[in-house]
Amino acid sequence: EAGVTQFPSHSVIEKGQTVTLRCDPISGHDNLYWYRRVMGKEIKFLLHFVKESKQDESGMPNNRFLAERTGGTYSTLKVQPAELEDSGVYFCASSQAGLMRAGELFFGEGSRLTVL
Amino acid sequence: KNEVEQSPQNLTAQEGEFITINCSYSVGISALHWLQQHPGGGIVSLFMLSSGKKKHGRLIATINIQEKHSSLHITASHPRDSAVYICAVRPWAGGTSYGKLTFGQGTILTVHP
């Protein structure tokens, strides 16, 4: 069974450009989470999808970030326009529905974003 | 001050040594996760616990809810255990977002042969 996959693994862009990160959760996982780790800081929660709906987006830093999960399968996180402070590693995780399984998180390898 | 504090931040050990990594948190939680990240790799979930103790191979995780403290122990450490170990808690305020975690800074473990 394929795990959580993220693409690209590394993206280098210039300030002001747009980048789109993609996360493919484990098949059948309703819950999908985005996190980010900026240099020297702890990982922070960004948002949570249940299927195609945003359950909690309280961690999104500002309106330059747009997350979508059309069809409830893969998710994209777009940063537009990118700023220097957006540099970091963006992680995605997924979990099954249901009380017993929802907390068992499976993480992707992360997408490293470098904004110059 | 972060709601989740880990100690030590860096840990160097010789192969075979018993290792302990500590995690203290300041909020009420419904669960605590221990995660592992190898250099250049993704994050792997080691344990999720809300009480007591769990064991998997050479890894043991304990939690004391009253004292808001958890420990991760590695017995008979091996160079392949070298990684960043991250403690993350699910605050009660997270509602039904079970992955809405608050993370510690991580502990960098290096085990020498």
Image (cartoon, rainbow, N blue to C red):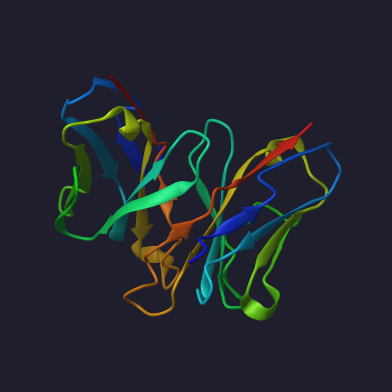
Question: Residue A85, image x and y in percent?
Answer: 69, 37
Q: Nearer the viewer, residue A2 or A42?
A: A2
Residue A39 percent coordinates (x, y): 58, 32
The quarter in which the C terminus of chain A is drawn is top right
Q: Nearer the viewer, residue A45 or B46?
A: B46
User: Residue at coordinates 31% horizontally, 75% vertically from top-left?
Assistant: A100
Where is residue A31 drawn, in percent x and y? 51, 71
**Quarter-of-image position of residue A59:** bottom right
Instruction: Say if residue A59 shows up in the picture.
Output: no
Q: Residue at x 35, y 53 (%)?
A: B89
Q: Is residue B39 left or right of residue B91?
A: right
Q: In this rendered view, identify the residue nearer to me: A45 or B85.
A: B85
Q: Residue furthest front?
A: A1
Q: Residue at x 35, y 30 (%)?
A: B82
Above or below, A63 against B80 in this view is: below
Residue A70 image point, x, y percent: 70, 76
Q: Is residue A25 left or right of residue B57?
A: right
